[in-house]
Image: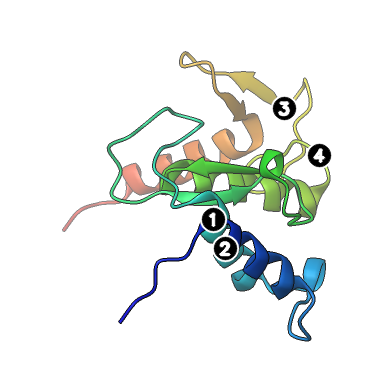
């Protein structure tokens, strides 16, 4: 049998849970913080980047790198945008600068803009052309 709790009772429960021995505060695990976010802010239901609402699921994404329980540090993303954000964040952490997928630091000399407006690494483009020419010149038996 379930009980219906008043809003005041729910507030008191949430305040008292912080005083319990199991409360880790900012030292909580990744999973625990995500559970806290879903509990307090609800299930993610749209993408704040591409404004999509047709994905099968949505995720809470932490904009900051410290996983604080502040609403401004979190956003709702579709899996595609979340993956792109995470890849860019990992690349930034590894190379410390704007870099291509293969880790080449982007400079004015080795970067061009394609017809879609995307940055293209000239080093990677040249390597791709060499591989394409090698594959095209092979005899097919």
SS at circle 1: helix
Where is mark 1, residue-wise?
Answer: 7
Other residues around mark 4 within 10 Å, as few (<14) / some (14–19) / many (≥20): few
Earlier-in-chain disc, 2 versus 3: 2
Read off the residue under disc 4: 97
Q: Quadrant of residue 85?
A: top right
Q: Which residue is identified by label 3?
A: 110
Local packing at callout 1 (Cα closer than 10 Å; few below 14, some 14-19, many 20+) is few
Q: Looking at the image, is 14 positioned above or below residue 131?
A: below
Give the residue number, with chain letter if any, for mark 2.
Answer: 10
Are dots 1 and 4 in contact, CB under 8 Å? no
Mark 1 or mark 3: which is in front?
A: 1
Q: Viewer-nearest of labels 3 and 4? A: 4
Q: Which element type, helix, strand or loop, lies under badge 3?
A: loop
Give me the C-alpha separation between circle 2 and circle 1. 5 Å
Tag count: 4
- Residue 95 or residue 21, whichever sits in front: 21
What's the CA distance linking mark 3 and mark 4? 14 Å
* Residue at mark 1 to residue at mark 3: CA–CA distance: 59 Å
Q: Is residue 56 among what the camera can see? A: yes
Q: Where is residue 22 shown, x and y percent of the image?
A: 73, 84
């Amino acid at each position: 049998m379930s009980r219906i709790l008043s809003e005041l009772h729910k507030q008191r429960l949430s305040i008292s849970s912080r005083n319990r021995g199991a409360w880790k505060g900012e030292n909580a695990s990744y999973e625990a913080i995500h559970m806290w976010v879903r509990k307090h802010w609800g299930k993610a239901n749209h993408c704040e980047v591409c404004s999509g609402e047709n994905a099968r699921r949505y995720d809470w994404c932490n904009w900051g790198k410290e996983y604080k329980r502040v609403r401004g540090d979190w956003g709702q993303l579709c899996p595609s945008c979340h993956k792109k954000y995470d890849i860019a964040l990992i690349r930034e952490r590894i190379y410390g600068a704007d870099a291509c997928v293969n880790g080449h630091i982007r400079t004015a000399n080795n970067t061009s803009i394609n017809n879609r407006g995307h940055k293209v690494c000239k080093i990677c483009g040249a390597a791709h052309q060499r591989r394409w020419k090698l594959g095209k010149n092979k005899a097919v038996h």
